[in-house]
Amino acid sequence: MIEIFKRFTFEAAHQLSDYPEIHGHSYSVEVRCQGPVRDGYVIREDVMCAAVDNVRQQLDHRMLNPIIETPTSENIAVWIWEQLVDHMPLSEVRVWRESVGFGAIYRGPAEDRKTA
Ligand SMILES: [Zn+2]
C-alpha cells in the first residue's frame, strides 16, 4: 500500500457564532489516497487532480456558509471528503490555516475505519 497526496489552497469567507463578523481565511488542504499500486499509480494524477480542482473551484473566493453548514475547519474537511469519496480511494483530508497553524484531519466515518 502506498499513500499519495495532493495539496491545494483556497481563499474563502465565513461567519461563525463565536466570530460573528464575516471574515476571510487562506486555507490549505491536503487530500490523501491509499491503495495498491496498479500500472504505477494508486490513482492516476490527472483523475485525482480533476476531481480535487472541481472541489477547489466550488470553495475558492466564496462565502462558505451557504455551501457548508457551520464552516469550521472540521466541517470543511468532512465536506471535502464527501465530495471526493466516490471518485478516489480516500484515506485522509486535512484542512488548515497556515497563518495560525490550526487545522483538522478527517479520516472518514468511524465504521469505515474499522474495516480499513
Ligand atoms: Zn474564521
Image: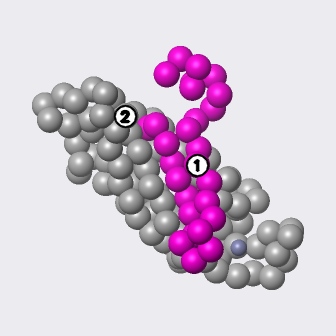
Q: Is residue 17 above or below residue 23?
A: above
Q: Is residue 104 visible?
A: yes
Q: Is residue 99 magenta?
A: yes
Q: Position of residue 81 (x, y in %)?
A: 53, 45
Question: x, y (%) of residue 4?
Answer: 32, 44
Q: Which residue appears farthest toward the top when viewing the image?
A: 115
In this picture, is 14 found above or below 58? below
Which residue was labeled with disc 2? 34
Left or right of 66 in this view: 53: left
Callout 1, which amino acid? Answer: Ile
Q: Is residue 35 above or below residue 12?
A: above
Query: In this image, 87 relative to 83: left or right?
Result: left
SS for callout 2: strand
Structural crowding at the residue carrying mark 1, measured as other residues with C-alpha within 10 Å and reported as few (<14), some (14–19) or many (≥20): some
- Left or right, 105 with reference to 19: left
- Residue at the image position 84 percent from the left and 77 percent from the top: 20
Q: Name the residue located 20 percent from the left edge and 37 percent from the top edge.
A: 41
Q: Amino acid at mark 2?
A: Gln
Q: Which residue is mark 1?
A: 105
Calculate the distance from the C-alpha at mark 2 to the C-alpha at mark 1. Answer: 15 Å
Of the four image quadrants, the one with ligand 1 is bottom right
> Residue, x 53% and y 72% (percent of image)?
98
**Start-end of magenta stretch:** 90-116
- 58 in magenta: no
Q: Quadrant of residue 114?
A: top right
